[in-house]
Image (cartoon, coloured by chain):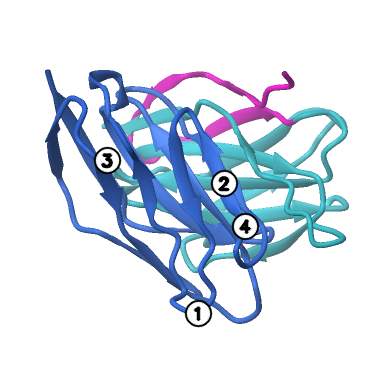
Amino acid sequence: EPEVTQTPSHQVTQMGQEVILRCVPISNHLYFYWYRQILGQKVEFLVSFYNNEISEKSEIFDDQFSVERPDGSNFTLKIRSTKLEDSAMYFCASILPYRQGVGYGYTFGSGTRLTVV
Amino acid sequence: GNSVTQMEGPVTLSEEAFLTINCTYTATGYPSLFWYVQYPGEGLQLLLKATKADDKGSNKGFEATYRKETTSFHLEKGSVQVSDSAVYFCAQGAQKLVFGQGTRLTINP
């Protein structure tokens, strides 16, 4: 079964440093997403990406965050200057578009646990 | 805006007990509804889904029925096992997903 792959599985970074989280979505999927889960809390939407641009973002996704799909296979989330409160599990997901009343369930990656110290 | 409200946890049951985890949603339109499971130290796995009213999603003995009239999608299992211990998330959406707060389930032998 196709998978969404995320690397690294765990990253520790110092406050103020830039970090890039990497994802390889399923190859024929068209929409890509980042979500995060602060320890013990709910999963929150960060950003969606379609046709090489952001289609929607949450209030969490401020100027410190950016996404790109640099080479047609990878999908990255960059945090420019990490804060302690950015410590969380970050999940990448991809889907085919919703059409004809059939919802194509998300495929999530296994996540990157980011720890900011 | 769209939201999902789940039964407060944690929930602790004995093996072979009947499980219900309540989930209600508010939405404009008719979103797809999902249950995801997160085992300790792991990512999110789709457990089941339903895409329209009265659909029943089922997987691994778990079931949930899309109830438009009560805006609910309660998760049920007739006989739980220790291996079902995990956090369960209800979610709604067509593209962007909105999650509930999660319910931690512990099954004791």
Residue A1 visible? The answer is yes
> What chain does mark 4 sit on?
B
Residue for badge 3: A39
Rendering quarter of residue A92: top right
Q: Residue at x 27, y 29 (%)?
A: B80
Q: Where B109 falls versus A67 (above or below)?
A: above
Q: Nearer the viewer, residue B61 or B7?
A: B61
> What chain does mark 3 sit on?
A
Q: Nearer the viewer, residue A82 or A25?
A: A25
Which chain is assigned cyan? A
Report the quarter where the C terminus of chain A lies.
Answer: top left
Between the residue at mark 2 and the residue at mark 4, the CA separation in whole angstroms equals: 7 Å
Residue for badge 2: B57
Say whether marks 2 and 4 touch (CB < 8 Å).
Answer: yes
**Dot 4 surroundings within 10 Å: few (below 14), some, or many (20 or more)?**
some
Q: Is residue A19 magenta?
A: yes
Between the residue at mark 2 and the residue at mark 1, the CA separation in whole angstroms equals: 17 Å
The answer to whether residue B16 is left or right of residue A76 is left
Say which amino acid is labelled 4.
Answer: Asp
Nearer mark to the viewer, of 2 and 3: 2
Q: Residue at x 87, y 34 (%)?
A: A28
Highlighted range, magenta: A1-25
Locate residue A72, reporting x and y percent: 87, 32
Image colour for chain B is blue
Residue for badge 4: B55
Say which amino acid is labelled 3.
Answer: Leu
Rendering quarter of residue B99: bottom left
* Mark number, residue B69: 1
Q: Where B11 falls versus B91 (above or below)?
A: above
Report the quarter where the N terminus of chain A lies.
Answer: top right
Count of labels in the image: 4
> What chain does mark 1 sit on?
B
